[in-house]
Image (cartoon, grey):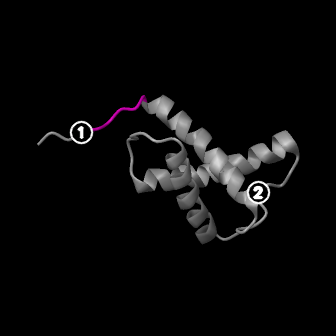
Amino acid sequence: MSILAWILIGLIAGAIAKALMPGKDPGGIIVTMLIGIAGGLLGGWLGKVLFGVDSIDGFFDLSTWVAAVAGSVILLALYRLVTGGRHHHRHV
């Protein structure tokens, strides 16, 4: 798949992960997209290692989306643990 496809999948998978795990997170759309892209790669790798399947087959394959969303949820949970739900406020 092309890098544009990964960015699109990452954006959507990151948004789905945030919808599945509501709450406030430090970071905006860029962080969501990066978590989604990395989550897709993590999900594909975990699918291959744990189940011996190639879960990142193509843009329209269900396994690609399930892996991307699952990986994004895992990374979002880890991101929340590491940041501790901190919110950065700017004082003027």
The span shown in magenta is 84-89
Which residue is at 68% across, 46% downward?
42
Find residue 41 and report its horizontal and vertical position in percent: 68, 52
Which residue is at 54% across, 49% downward?
35
Q: Is residue 41 left or right of residue 75?
A: right
As drawn, 41 above or below 74: below
- The quadrant of the rendering that contains the C terminus is top left
Which residue is at 74% across, 60% downward?
62
Q: Secondary structure at mark 2?
A: helix
Circle 1 is placed at which residue position?
A: 89
Specify few, some or many for label 2: CA neighbours under 10 Å numbering under 14, 14-19, or 20 or more: some
Q: Is residue 15 left or right of residue 42?
A: left
First reached walking from the N terminus: tag 2 or tag 1: 2
Circle 2 is placed at which residue position?
A: 63
For this rendering, which residue is in front, 10 or 65? 65
Q: Secondary structure at mark 1?
A: loop
Separation of residues labelled 2 and 1 (CA atoms): 39 Å
As drawn, 16 above or below 60: above
As drawn, 77 above or below 5: above
Q: At label 1, which amino acid type do we have?
A: His
Is 51 a magenta residue?
no
Which mark's residue is nearer the viewer, 2 or 1? 2
Whether residues under marks 2 and 1 lie with C-beta atoms below 8 angstroms apart, the answer is no
Specify few, some or many for label 1: CA neighbours under 10 Å numbering under 14, 14-19, or 20 or more: few
The number of numbered discs placed on residues in the rendered structure image is: 2
Find residue 83 and report its horizontal and vertical position in percent: 43, 32
Majority SS type along the magenta span: loop
